[in-house]
Image (cartoon, rainbow, N blue to C red):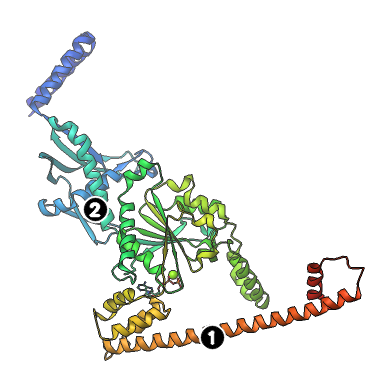
Amino acid sequence: MGETWSQIGSWIATIMFLWAMFDNYFPDHLRSFILSYSMKLASFVYPYINITFNEFIGDSDEYMDLKRSDAYAAIETYLSGKSSREARNLKAVVVKDSSQPVQLSLDENEGVTDEFKGVKLSWTVKKNTTRTQSFSIFPEIDEKKYYKLTFHKSHRDLVCGAYINHVMQKGKEITVSNRQRKLYTNNPSKNWERYKARKWSHVTFEHPATFDTLAMESKKKLEIVNDLEKFSKGKEYYTKIGKAWKRGYLLYGPPGTGKSSMIAAMANHLEYDIYDLELTTVKDNTELRRLLIETTGKSIIVIEDIDCSLDLTGQRKKEKKKAEDEEAKDPISKMTKGEEDSNSKVTLSGLLNFIDGLWSAIGGERIIVFTTNYVEKLDPALIRRGRMDKHIELSYCGFEAFKVLAKNYLDVDSHPFFVTIGHLLEETNITPADVAENLMPKSLNEDAEACLKKLIEAIKTAKEEATKKAEEEARLKAEKEEKEKQEDVKVDGCLAKVKENCVGVLVKDDEALAKEVKDNGVTA
Ligand SMILES: Nc1ncnc2c1ncn2[C@@H]1O[C@H](COP(=O)(O)OP(=O)(O)OP(=O)(O)O)[C@@H](O)[C@H]1O
Ligand SMILES: [Mg+2]
Protein backbone atom coordinates (compact mmCIF):
# COMPACT_ATOMS: atom_id res chain seq x y z
CA MET A 1 0.00 0.00 0.00
CA GLY A 2 2.77 2.37 1.04
CA GLU A 3 4.60 1.51 -2.15
CA THR A 4 1.57 2.41 -4.31
CA TRP A 5 1.24 5.77 -2.59
CA SER A 6 4.91 6.57 -3.12
CA GLN A 7 4.55 5.62 -6.80
CA ILE A 8 1.52 7.93 -7.26
CA GLY A 9 3.44 10.69 -5.48
CA SER A 10 6.40 10.36 -7.79
CA TRP A 11 4.11 10.40 -10.87
CA ILE A 12 2.42 13.59 -9.75
CA ALA A 13 5.81 15.19 -9.04
CA THR A 14 7.05 14.22 -12.52
CA ILE A 15 3.89 15.61 -14.24
CA MET A 16 4.19 18.86 -12.31
CA PHE A 17 7.86 19.13 -13.15
CA LEU A 18 7.16 18.57 -16.89
CA TRP A 19 4.27 21.06 -16.84
CA ALA A 20 6.49 23.71 -15.20
CA MET A 21 9.24 23.08 -17.80
CA PHE A 22 6.61 23.30 -20.59
CA ASP A 23 5.15 26.50 -19.19
CA ASN A 24 8.52 28.19 -18.53
CA TYR A 25 10.88 27.09 -21.26
CA PHE A 26 8.82 26.36 -24.34
CA PRO A 27 8.60 29.31 -26.68
CA ASP A 28 5.09 30.78 -27.08
CA HIS A 29 4.48 29.72 -30.68
CA LEU A 30 5.66 26.15 -29.93
CA ARG A 31 3.44 26.00 -26.89
CA SER A 32 0.24 27.03 -28.76
CA PHE A 33 1.18 24.58 -31.52
CA ILE A 34 1.44 21.70 -29.06
CA LEU A 35 -1.75 22.78 -27.27
CA SER A 36 -3.78 22.95 -30.49
CA TYR A 37 -2.59 19.49 -31.50
CA SER A 38 -3.39 18.04 -28.12
CA MET A 39 -6.94 19.55 -28.41
CA LYS A 40 -7.32 17.97 -31.83
CA LEU A 41 -6.20 14.65 -30.42
CA ALA A 42 -8.72 14.98 -27.59
CA SER A 43 -11.53 15.83 -29.99
CA PHE A 44 -10.56 12.86 -32.14
CA VAL A 45 -10.81 10.56 -29.17
CA TYR A 46 -14.03 12.29 -27.83
CA PRO A 47 -15.82 14.01 -30.75
CA TYR A 48 -18.75 15.32 -28.68
CA ILE A 49 -19.71 18.75 -27.43
CA ASN A 50 -21.40 19.41 -24.10
CA ILE A 51 -23.50 22.45 -23.24
CA THR A 52 -24.70 23.01 -19.68
CA PHE A 53 -27.77 24.93 -18.60
CA ASN A 54 -27.66 25.83 -14.90
CA GLU A 55 -30.84 25.86 -12.85
CA PHE A 56 -29.99 29.15 -11.21
CA ILE A 57 -28.35 32.13 -12.79
CA GLY A 58 -26.99 35.31 -11.28
CA ASP A 59 -24.33 36.05 -8.70
CA SER A 60 -23.96 32.90 -6.62
CA ASP A 61 -22.21 34.84 -3.83
CA GLU A 62 -25.28 36.97 -3.44
CA TYR A 63 -27.94 34.42 -2.65
CA MET A 64 -30.67 37.00 -3.11
CA ASP A 65 -29.56 37.66 -6.68
CA LEU A 66 -30.03 34.07 -7.78
CA LYS A 67 -32.91 33.59 -10.13
CA ARG A 68 -34.27 30.37 -11.63
CA SER A 69 -33.21 30.27 -15.21
CA ASP A 70 -35.99 30.55 -17.79
CA ALA A 71 -33.96 28.33 -20.13
CA TYR A 72 -33.72 25.58 -17.46
CA ALA A 73 -37.49 25.77 -16.87
CA ALA A 74 -38.19 25.63 -20.62
CA ILE A 75 -35.92 22.57 -21.04
CA GLU A 76 -37.57 20.85 -18.08
CA THR A 77 -41.02 21.40 -19.60
CA TYR A 78 -39.86 20.43 -23.09
CA LEU A 79 -38.39 17.15 -21.84
CA SER A 80 -41.27 16.38 -19.49
CA GLY A 81 -43.24 14.28 -22.01
CA LYS A 82 -40.16 12.36 -23.16
CA SER A 83 -38.96 11.85 -19.58
CA SER A 84 -42.23 10.30 -18.46
CA ARG A 85 -42.06 7.86 -21.39
CA GLU A 86 -38.36 6.95 -21.39
CA ALA A 87 -36.62 7.62 -18.07
CA ARG A 88 -36.59 5.23 -15.13
CA ASN A 89 -35.90 7.71 -12.36
CA LEU A 90 -38.33 10.58 -12.36
CA LYS A 91 -39.12 13.41 -10.04
CA ALA A 92 -42.57 14.94 -9.59
CA VAL A 93 -42.57 18.74 -9.37
CA VAL A 94 -45.60 20.79 -8.39
CA VAL A 95 -45.86 23.61 -10.90
CA LYS A 96 -47.54 26.80 -9.75
CA ASP A 97 -50.55 28.00 -11.72
CA SER A 98 -50.56 24.95 -14.00
CA SER A 99 -53.60 22.97 -15.05
CA GLN A 100 -51.60 19.78 -14.43
CA PRO A 101 -51.14 19.03 -10.73
CA VAL A 102 -47.59 17.74 -11.15
CA GLN A 103 -44.96 17.76 -13.87
CA LEU A 104 -42.59 14.83 -14.20
CA SER A 105 -38.95 15.61 -14.79
CA LEU A 106 -35.66 13.71 -14.89
CA ASP A 107 -34.06 12.80 -11.60
CA GLU A 108 -30.32 13.32 -11.07
CA ASN A 109 -28.01 11.45 -13.43
CA GLU A 110 -30.94 10.33 -15.56
CA GLY A 111 -30.96 11.02 -19.29
CA VAL A 112 -33.17 10.99 -22.36
CA THR A 113 -32.43 11.21 -26.05
CA ASP A 114 -33.98 13.57 -28.54
CA GLU A 115 -33.93 13.84 -32.30
CA PHE A 116 -34.00 17.02 -34.37
CA LYS A 117 -33.82 17.03 -38.18
CA GLY A 118 -32.26 13.58 -38.13
CA VAL A 119 -29.62 14.53 -35.54
CA LYS A 120 -29.47 12.55 -32.29
CA LEU A 121 -28.85 14.44 -29.05
CA SER A 122 -28.82 13.45 -25.42
CA TRP A 123 -29.91 15.32 -22.32
CA THR A 124 -28.84 14.43 -18.78
CA VAL A 125 -29.46 16.03 -15.42
CA LYS A 126 -26.37 16.48 -13.28
CA LYS A 127 -25.70 17.93 -9.92
CA ASN A 128 -22.63 19.70 -8.53
CA THR A 129 -22.34 19.48 -4.80
CA THR A 130 -19.99 21.76 -2.90
CA ARG A 131 -19.61 22.38 0.79
CA THR A 132 -19.71 26.05 1.60
CA GLN A 133 -17.29 27.52 4.11
CA SER A 134 -19.09 28.15 7.34
CA PHE A 135 -18.34 28.17 11.03
CA SER A 136 -21.22 25.83 11.80
CA ILE A 137 -20.56 22.26 12.86
CA PHE A 138 -23.00 21.30 10.10
CA PRO A 139 -21.41 22.65 6.94
CA GLU A 140 -23.98 23.86 4.43
CA ILE A 141 -24.18 21.85 1.26
CA ASP A 142 -24.62 23.87 -1.90
CA GLU A 143 -26.22 21.91 -4.73
CA LYS A 144 -26.28 23.17 -8.27
CA LYS A 145 -28.33 21.29 -10.76
CA TYR A 146 -27.90 21.60 -14.47
CA TYR A 147 -28.99 20.03 -17.74
CA LYS A 148 -26.20 18.75 -19.96
CA LEU A 149 -26.81 18.59 -23.69
CA THR A 150 -24.41 16.32 -25.61
CA PHE A 151 -24.12 16.07 -29.39
CA HIS A 152 -21.58 15.27 -32.10
CA LYS A 153 -19.30 18.15 -33.01
CA SER A 154 -20.36 17.97 -36.67
CA HIS A 155 -23.82 19.32 -35.72
CA ARG A 156 -22.55 22.30 -33.79
CA ASP A 157 -24.26 24.96 -35.95
CA LEU A 158 -27.60 23.22 -36.11
CA VAL A 159 -27.75 22.52 -32.39
CA CYS A 160 -26.45 25.89 -31.19
CA GLY A 161 -28.86 27.74 -33.44
CA ALA A 162 -32.06 26.06 -34.58
CA TYR A 163 -32.29 23.23 -32.03
CA ILE A 164 -31.85 25.32 -28.89
CA ASN A 165 -34.36 27.86 -30.22
CA HIS A 166 -36.76 25.03 -30.91
CA VAL A 167 -36.43 23.69 -27.35
CA MET A 168 -36.96 27.13 -25.81
CA GLN A 169 -39.98 27.89 -27.98
CA LYS A 170 -41.65 24.51 -27.50
CA GLY A 171 -40.98 24.60 -23.74
CA LYS A 172 -42.64 28.00 -23.46
CA GLU A 173 -45.57 26.92 -25.62
CA ILE A 174 -46.19 23.88 -23.43
CA THR A 175 -46.00 26.09 -20.32
CA VAL A 176 -48.56 28.47 -21.80
CA SER A 177 -50.95 25.71 -22.80
CA ASN A 178 -50.64 24.04 -19.36
CA ARG A 179 -50.96 27.19 -17.34
CA GLN A 180 -54.12 28.15 -15.52
CA ARG A 181 -55.30 31.43 -16.85
CA LYS A 182 -55.83 34.31 -14.48
CA LEU A 183 -58.29 37.08 -13.95
CA TYR A 184 -56.54 40.11 -12.48
CA THR A 185 -57.93 43.22 -10.88
CA ASN A 186 -55.97 46.29 -9.80
CA ASN A 187 -55.41 46.96 -6.08
CA PRO A 188 -55.98 50.47 -4.74
CA SER A 189 -52.65 52.29 -4.89
CA LYS A 190 -52.56 53.04 -1.16
CA ASN A 191 -51.76 49.33 -0.67
CA TRP A 192 -48.94 49.22 -3.23
CA GLU A 193 -46.11 50.06 -0.86
CA ARG A 194 -46.91 47.39 1.72
CA TYR A 195 -44.59 44.41 2.17
CA LYS A 196 -45.10 41.99 -0.72
CA ALA A 197 -47.99 44.12 -1.96
CA ARG A 198 -48.81 43.81 -5.61
CA LYS A 199 -50.49 46.14 -8.01
CA TRP A 200 -52.71 43.38 -9.36
CA SER A 201 -54.49 40.60 -7.45
CA HIS A 202 -55.63 37.52 -9.29
CA VAL A 203 -57.90 34.52 -9.16
CA THR A 204 -58.05 31.60 -11.58
CA PHE A 205 -60.06 32.54 -14.64
CA GLU A 206 -62.82 29.99 -15.07
CA HIS A 207 -65.55 31.66 -17.12
CA PRO A 208 -67.07 28.99 -19.39
CA ALA A 209 -68.25 31.32 -22.21
CA THR A 210 -66.97 30.44 -25.68
CA PHE A 211 -67.80 31.61 -29.17
CA ASP A 212 -70.00 28.50 -29.51
CA THR A 213 -72.16 29.55 -26.58
CA LEU A 214 -72.31 33.18 -27.67
CA ALA A 215 -75.60 34.11 -29.31
CA MET A 216 -75.04 36.31 -32.34
CA GLU A 217 -75.14 36.16 -36.11
CA SER A 218 -72.76 33.49 -37.35
CA LYS A 219 -71.25 35.78 -39.99
CA LYS A 220 -70.38 38.42 -37.42
CA LYS A 221 -69.05 35.80 -35.03
CA LEU A 222 -66.79 34.31 -37.69
CA GLU A 223 -65.48 37.73 -38.58
CA ILE A 224 -64.50 38.38 -34.94
CA VAL A 225 -62.87 34.95 -34.54
CA ASN A 226 -60.87 35.47 -37.74
CA ASP A 227 -59.81 38.91 -36.59
CA LEU A 228 -58.59 37.53 -33.25
CA GLU A 229 -56.68 34.71 -34.89
CA LYS A 230 -55.05 36.98 -37.42
CA PHE A 231 -53.93 39.18 -34.55
CA SER A 232 -52.58 36.39 -32.33
CA LYS A 233 -50.50 34.95 -35.19
CA GLY A 234 -49.40 38.32 -36.50
CA LYS A 235 -46.11 38.93 -34.69
CA GLU A 236 -44.01 39.24 -37.84
CA TYR A 237 -46.69 41.26 -39.60
CA TYR A 238 -46.87 43.83 -36.81
CA THR A 239 -43.08 44.10 -36.77
CA LYS A 240 -43.07 44.55 -40.54
CA ILE A 241 -45.57 47.39 -40.50
CA GLY A 242 -43.88 49.02 -37.49
CA LYS A 243 -46.85 48.79 -35.14
CA ALA A 244 -46.95 47.62 -31.53
CA TRP A 245 -48.47 44.16 -31.31
CA LYS A 246 -51.83 45.11 -29.83
CA ARG A 247 -55.42 45.54 -30.89
CA GLY A 248 -58.31 47.50 -29.47
CA TYR A 249 -61.92 46.37 -29.44
CA LEU A 250 -64.89 48.51 -28.52
CA LEU A 251 -67.93 46.48 -27.50
CA TYR A 252 -71.12 48.48 -27.29
CA GLY A 253 -74.79 47.75 -26.87
CA PRO A 254 -77.61 47.73 -24.32
CA PRO A 255 -77.18 45.91 -20.97
CA GLY A 256 -77.50 42.13 -21.21
CA THR A 257 -76.48 41.75 -24.84
CA GLY A 258 -73.31 39.78 -24.12
CA LYS A 259 -70.42 42.26 -23.92
CA SER A 260 -68.84 40.68 -20.84
CA SER A 261 -69.59 37.20 -22.17
CA MET A 262 -67.77 38.07 -25.38
CA ILE A 263 -64.65 39.16 -23.45
CA ALA A 264 -64.64 35.80 -21.66
CA ALA A 265 -65.09 34.01 -25.00
CA MET A 266 -62.17 35.97 -26.48
CA ALA A 267 -59.91 35.06 -23.55
CA ASN A 268 -60.89 31.40 -23.75
CA HIS A 269 -60.37 31.30 -27.50
CA LEU A 270 -56.90 32.85 -27.40
CA GLU A 271 -55.95 31.38 -24.00
CA TYR A 272 -55.12 34.84 -22.68
CA ASP A 273 -55.28 36.21 -19.14
CA ILE A 274 -57.67 39.05 -18.35
CA TYR A 275 -56.74 42.29 -16.57
CA ASP A 276 -59.99 43.89 -15.43
CA LEU A 277 -58.94 47.50 -14.86
CA GLU A 278 -61.09 49.46 -12.42
CA LEU A 279 -60.26 53.01 -13.46
CA THR A 280 -62.03 54.70 -10.58
CA THR A 281 -59.43 53.42 -8.09
CA VAL A 282 -56.49 54.65 -10.19
CA LYS A 283 -55.35 57.99 -8.81
CA ASP A 284 -53.61 59.52 -11.78
CA ASN A 285 -51.94 58.94 -15.13
CA THR A 286 -48.63 57.87 -13.53
CA GLU A 287 -50.38 55.11 -11.61
CA LEU A 288 -52.11 54.04 -14.79
CA ARG A 289 -48.73 53.68 -16.50
CA ARG A 290 -47.31 51.71 -13.55
CA LEU A 291 -50.22 49.31 -13.77
CA LEU A 292 -49.67 48.89 -17.48
CA ILE A 293 -45.99 48.04 -16.99
CA GLU A 294 -46.95 45.22 -14.62
CA THR A 295 -49.25 43.47 -17.08
CA THR A 296 -47.91 40.51 -19.01
CA GLY A 297 -48.19 39.59 -22.68
CA LYS A 298 -50.94 37.28 -23.95
CA SER A 299 -53.54 39.23 -22.06
CA ILE A 300 -56.73 41.21 -22.52
CA ILE A 301 -56.92 44.49 -20.65
CA VAL A 302 -60.57 45.33 -20.03
CA ILE A 303 -62.14 48.62 -19.04
CA GLU A 304 -65.86 48.00 -18.56
CA ASP A 305 -68.42 50.80 -18.83
CA ILE A 306 -65.82 53.29 -19.99
CA ASP A 307 -68.45 56.04 -20.15
CA CYS A 308 -68.90 55.80 -16.36
CA SER A 309 -65.23 55.35 -15.49
CA LEU A 310 -63.86 58.59 -16.78
CA ASP A 311 -64.95 62.17 -16.67
CA LEU A 312 -65.38 62.18 -20.43
CA THR A 313 -69.10 62.44 -20.46
CA GLY A 314 -69.99 64.19 -17.24
CA GLN A 315 -71.18 60.86 -15.85
CA ARG A 316 -68.71 60.82 -13.06
CA LYS A 317 -69.51 64.36 -12.03
CA LYS A 318 -73.12 63.31 -11.68
CA GLU A 319 -72.19 60.23 -9.73
CA LYS A 320 -69.87 62.22 -7.49
CA LYS A 321 -72.55 64.76 -6.77
CA LYS A 322 -75.00 61.98 -5.94
CA ALA A 323 -72.43 60.37 -3.65
CA GLU A 324 -71.78 63.69 -1.92
CA ASP A 325 -75.49 64.19 -1.36
CA GLU A 326 -75.74 60.71 0.13
CA GLU A 327 -72.74 61.37 2.36
CA ALA A 328 -74.28 64.58 3.62
CA LYS A 329 -77.29 62.53 4.70
CA ASP A 330 -75.16 59.74 6.17
CA PRO A 331 -71.88 61.07 7.60
CA ILE A 332 -70.99 57.72 9.22
CA SER A 333 -70.69 56.01 5.85
CA LYS A 334 -68.30 58.76 4.80
CA MET A 335 -66.07 58.11 7.79
CA THR A 336 -65.99 54.36 7.24
CA LYS A 337 -65.13 54.79 3.55
CA GLY A 338 -61.97 56.66 4.54
CA GLU A 339 -59.69 57.65 1.69
CA GLU A 340 -61.05 55.10 -0.74
CA ASP A 341 -63.20 57.50 -2.65
CA SER A 342 -60.36 59.91 -3.31
CA ASN A 343 -60.69 61.56 -6.67
CA SER A 344 -59.16 59.89 -9.68
CA LYS A 345 -57.23 62.30 -11.84
CA VAL A 346 -56.88 59.99 -14.81
CA THR A 347 -57.42 62.15 -17.85
CA LEU A 348 -58.41 61.40 -21.40
CA SER A 349 -54.87 62.08 -22.59
CA GLY A 350 -53.53 59.72 -19.88
CA LEU A 351 -55.84 57.00 -21.10
CA LEU A 352 -54.91 57.61 -24.73
CA ASN A 353 -51.27 57.28 -23.76
CA PHE A 354 -52.07 54.06 -21.93
CA ILE A 355 -53.63 52.67 -25.09
CA ASP A 356 -51.13 53.74 -27.71
CA GLY A 357 -48.28 55.67 -26.15
CA LEU A 358 -44.69 54.46 -26.23
CA TRP A 359 -45.18 52.47 -23.02
CA SER A 360 -48.03 50.49 -24.48
CA ALA A 361 -45.65 48.58 -26.76
CA ILE A 362 -43.86 46.76 -23.94
CA GLY A 363 -44.47 43.15 -23.04
CA GLY A 364 -45.80 41.43 -26.14
CA GLU A 365 -49.20 40.76 -27.56
CA ARG A 366 -52.10 42.48 -25.88
CA ILE A 367 -55.72 43.22 -26.55
CA ILE A 368 -57.50 46.21 -25.04
CA VAL A 369 -61.27 46.06 -24.73
CA PHE A 370 -63.62 48.87 -23.77
CA THR A 371 -67.29 48.25 -23.15
CA THR A 372 -70.08 50.80 -23.02
CA ASN A 373 -73.84 51.02 -23.13
CA TYR A 374 -73.71 54.50 -24.67
CA VAL A 375 -71.24 54.64 -27.55
CA GLU A 376 -72.46 58.07 -28.64
CA LYS A 377 -71.30 59.57 -25.34
CA LEU A 378 -67.63 58.65 -25.84
CA ASP A 379 -65.03 61.10 -27.00
CA PRO A 380 -64.27 60.35 -30.69
CA ALA A 381 -60.54 60.61 -29.92
CA LEU A 382 -60.81 57.63 -27.59
CA ILE A 383 -62.46 55.30 -30.04
CA ARG A 384 -60.92 56.29 -33.35
CA ARG A 385 -59.51 53.44 -35.46
CA GLY A 386 -55.97 52.67 -34.48
CA ARG A 387 -56.96 52.95 -30.83
CA MET A 388 -60.15 50.95 -30.85
CA ASP A 389 -59.50 49.12 -34.10
CA LYS A 390 -62.71 47.14 -34.21
CA HIS A 391 -66.10 48.39 -33.08
CA ILE A 392 -68.51 45.56 -32.33
CA GLU A 393 -72.16 46.20 -31.71
CA LEU A 394 -73.94 43.69 -29.52
CA SER A 395 -77.61 44.14 -30.01
CA TYR A 396 -81.04 42.75 -29.22
CA CYS A 397 -81.71 39.10 -29.87
CA GLY A 398 -82.40 38.19 -33.50
CA PHE A 399 -83.65 34.84 -34.79
CA GLU A 400 -80.17 33.49 -35.46
CA ALA A 401 -78.99 34.40 -31.96
CA PHE A 402 -82.13 32.81 -30.54
CA LYS A 403 -81.34 29.55 -32.36
CA VAL A 404 -77.89 29.44 -30.72
CA LEU A 405 -79.48 29.94 -27.30
CA ALA A 406 -82.17 27.31 -27.98
CA LYS A 407 -79.47 24.82 -28.95
CA ASN A 408 -77.35 25.63 -25.90
CA TYR A 409 -80.09 25.83 -23.31
CA LEU A 410 -82.57 23.23 -24.56
CA ASP A 411 -80.60 21.19 -27.08
CA VAL A 412 -83.28 21.95 -29.69
CA ASP A 413 -82.44 22.68 -33.34
CA SER A 414 -85.97 23.20 -34.62
CA HIS A 415 -89.51 23.31 -33.33
CA PRO A 416 -92.91 24.43 -34.72
CA PHE A 417 -92.80 27.36 -32.26
CA PHE A 418 -89.67 28.72 -33.95
CA VAL A 419 -91.73 30.45 -36.69
CA THR A 420 -93.80 32.41 -34.15
CA ILE A 421 -90.70 33.28 -32.17
CA GLY A 422 -88.94 34.45 -35.35
CA HIS A 423 -91.83 36.83 -36.19
CA LEU A 424 -92.04 38.12 -32.64
CA LEU A 425 -88.30 38.77 -32.44
CA GLU A 426 -88.45 40.81 -35.64
CA GLU A 427 -90.97 43.14 -34.04
CA THR A 428 -89.61 43.25 -30.49
CA ASN A 429 -86.42 44.40 -28.80
CA ILE A 430 -85.50 41.78 -26.23
CA THR A 431 -81.97 41.15 -24.96
CA PRO A 432 -80.24 37.76 -25.26
CA ALA A 433 -80.01 37.81 -21.44
CA ASP A 434 -83.84 37.90 -21.19
CA VAL A 435 -84.24 35.22 -23.85
CA ALA A 436 -81.68 33.02 -22.09
CA GLU A 437 -83.43 33.46 -18.76
CA ASN A 438 -86.74 32.30 -20.25
CA LEU A 439 -85.19 29.36 -22.04
CA MET A 440 -83.63 27.99 -18.89
CA PRO A 441 -85.80 25.22 -17.37
CA LYS A 442 -86.77 26.15 -13.82
CA SER A 443 -87.83 22.69 -12.65
CA LEU A 444 -87.09 19.08 -13.48
CA ASN A 445 -90.41 18.56 -15.31
CA GLU A 446 -90.21 21.69 -17.45
CA ASP A 447 -89.41 20.50 -20.97
CA ALA A 448 -88.23 22.37 -24.09
CA GLU A 449 -91.75 23.07 -25.30
CA ALA A 450 -92.76 24.61 -21.98
CA CYS A 451 -89.68 26.84 -22.07
CA LEU A 452 -90.37 27.96 -25.63
CA LYS A 453 -93.98 28.75 -24.66
CA LYS A 454 -92.69 30.74 -21.71
CA LEU A 455 -90.41 32.65 -24.07
CA ILE A 456 -93.28 33.45 -26.47
CA GLU A 457 -95.27 34.86 -23.57
CA ALA A 458 -92.28 36.89 -22.39
CA ILE A 459 -91.70 38.37 -25.86
CA LYS A 460 -95.42 39.21 -26.17
CA THR A 461 -95.33 40.94 -22.79
CA ALA A 462 -92.17 42.83 -23.80
CA LYS A 463 -93.89 43.84 -27.04
CA GLU A 464 -96.98 45.10 -25.20
CA GLU A 465 -94.84 47.00 -22.73
CA ALA A 466 -92.83 48.55 -25.54
CA THR A 467 -96.04 49.59 -27.34
CA LYS A 468 -97.41 51.09 -24.12
CA LYS A 469 -94.16 52.88 -23.48
CA ALA A 470 -94.07 54.26 -27.03
CA GLU A 471 -97.67 55.45 -26.69
CA GLU A 472 -96.91 57.10 -23.37
CA GLU A 473 -93.87 58.80 -24.85
CA ALA A 474 -95.88 60.00 -27.84
CA ARG A 475 -98.56 61.37 -25.49
CA LEU A 476 -95.96 63.20 -23.36
CA LYS A 477 -94.32 64.61 -26.47
CA ALA A 478 -97.65 65.86 -27.84
CA GLU A 479 -98.47 67.42 -24.46
CA LYS A 480 -95.11 69.16 -24.37
CA GLU A 481 -95.53 70.49 -27.89
CA GLU A 482 -99.02 71.75 -27.10
CA LYS A 483 -97.73 73.53 -23.97
CA GLU A 484 -94.92 75.16 -25.93
CA LYS A 485 -97.37 76.27 -28.60
CA GLN A 486 -99.60 77.86 -25.97
CA GLU A 487 -96.62 79.61 -24.41
CA ASP A 488 -95.61 80.97 -27.80
CA VAL A 489 -99.11 82.33 -28.35
CA LYS A 490 -98.98 83.99 -24.89
CA VAL A 491 -95.55 85.46 -25.63
CA ASP A 492 -96.71 86.78 -28.99
CA GLY A 493 -99.65 88.45 -27.26
CA CYS A 494 -97.43 90.07 -24.62
CA LEU A 495 -94.97 91.16 -27.26
CA ALA A 496 -97.70 92.90 -29.21
CA LYS A 497 -98.83 94.64 -25.99
CA VAL A 498 -95.28 95.83 -25.16
CA LYS A 499 -94.73 97.10 -28.68
CA GLU A 500 -98.04 98.97 -28.54
CA ASN A 501 -97.05 100.72 -25.27
CA CYS A 502 -93.50 101.54 -26.22
CA VAL A 503 -93.87 102.92 -29.72
CA GLY A 504 -90.87 105.07 -30.49
CA VAL A 505 -88.80 103.93 -27.47
CA LEU A 506 -88.17 100.42 -28.66
CA VAL A 507 -84.48 99.81 -28.48
CA LYS A 508 -84.30 96.05 -28.47
CA ASP A 509 -84.85 93.86 -31.45
CA ASP A 510 -87.87 91.61 -31.55
CA GLU A 511 -86.04 88.45 -30.71
CA ALA A 512 -84.31 89.79 -27.56
CA LEU A 513 -87.54 91.33 -26.40
CA ALA A 514 -89.42 88.09 -26.95
CA LYS A 515 -86.82 86.24 -24.89
CA GLU A 516 -87.09 88.71 -22.04
CA VAL A 517 -90.88 88.54 -22.08
CA LYS A 518 -90.70 84.76 -22.10
CA ASP A 519 -88.25 84.71 -19.15
CA ASN A 520 -89.75 87.44 -16.98
CA GLY A 521 -93.37 87.81 -18.10
CA VAL A 522 -95.18 90.96 -19.24
CA THR A 523 -93.35 93.21 -16.71
CA ALA A 524 -90.29 93.13 -18.96
N1 LIG B 1 -75.03 37.22 -26.80
C1 LIG B 1 -75.20 36.38 -25.78
N2 LIG B 1 -74.95 35.08 -25.93
C2 LIG B 1 -75.11 34.23 -24.92
N3 LIG B 1 -75.52 34.58 -23.70
C3 LIG B 1 -75.77 35.88 -23.49
C4 LIG B 1 -75.60 36.84 -24.52
N4 LIG B 1 -75.94 38.05 -24.02
C5 LIG B 1 -76.27 37.85 -22.75
N5 LIG B 1 -76.17 36.56 -22.41
C6 LIG B 1 -76.49 35.98 -21.10
O1 LIG B 1 -76.87 37.05 -20.26
C7 LIG B 1 -76.00 37.23 -19.16
C8 LIG B 1 -75.56 38.68 -19.09
O2 LIG B 1 -74.75 38.99 -20.22
P1 LIG B 1 -73.46 39.93 -20.16
O3 LIG B 1 -73.01 40.10 -18.75
O4 LIG B 1 -72.47 39.38 -21.11
O5 LIG B 1 -74.10 41.27 -20.68
P2 LIG B 1 -73.41 42.69 -20.86
O6 LIG B 1 -73.68 43.13 -22.25
O7 LIG B 1 -72.01 42.63 -20.40
O8 LIG B 1 -74.30 43.57 -19.86
P3 LIG B 1 -73.88 44.93 -19.10
O9 LIG B 1 -73.87 46.02 -20.12
O10 LIG B 1 -74.98 45.10 -18.11
O11 LIG B 1 -72.55 44.69 -18.47
C9 LIG B 1 -74.84 36.31 -19.39
O12 LIG B 1 -74.52 35.62 -18.22
C10 LIG B 1 -75.30 35.35 -20.46
O13 LIG B 1 -75.74 34.17 -19.85
MG1 LIG C 1 -71.00 43.50 -18.77
Q: How far apart are marks 2 and 1 (CA)?
A: 60 Å
Task: Report whether residue 81 is seen.
Answer: yes
Q: Quadrant of the C terminus?
A: bottom right
Image coordinates of residue 279 in percent, x first then y, are 52, 61
The quarter holding residue 117 reads top left
Q: Where is residue 423 in the image (x, y as percent from the top left)?
A: 35, 82
Q: Residue at x 37, y 66 (%)?
A: 262
Q: Position of residue 214 (x, y in %)?
A: 33, 70
As drawn, is 406 to the left or to the right of 313?
left
Query: What label does residue 471 carry, if any?
Result: 1
Split into quadrants, the picture shows ligand 2 in the one at: bottom left
Query: In terms of image quadrants, where is residue 142?
Result: top left
| Residue under the image location 49 percent in, 61 percent down | 187
Q: In the rendered image of this protein, does residue 167 appear above or below residue 328? A: above
Q: Are marks 2 and 1 in contact (CB under 8 Å)?
A: no
Mark 1 is surrounded, within 10 Å at the Cα level, by few (under 14), some (14 to 19) or many (20 or more) other residues, namely few
Q: Residue 261: horizontal and vertical position, in percent? A: 37, 69
Looking at the rendered image, the disc whose residue lies closer to the viewer, 2 or 1, is: 1
Res 174 label = 2
**Quadrant of the frame with the N terminus:** top left
Q: Earlier in the sequence, mark 2 or mark 1?
A: 2
Q: In which quarter of the image is residue 56?
A: top left
Say what amino acid the circle numbered 1 marks: Glu
Secondary structure, mark 2, is helix
Q: Which residue is drawn at 13% across and 35% down?
A: 151
What amino acid type should be assigned to the residue bearing mark 2?
Answer: Ile
Kindly identify the residue that appears in the image at 49 percent across and 57 percent down: 383
The relative height of residue 247 versus residue 23 in the rendered view (above or below) is below
On screen, residue 322 versus residue 17, left or right, reads right
Helix, strand or loop at label 1? It is helix
Q: Front-most of 1 and 435?
A: 435
Whether residue 6 is visible:
no
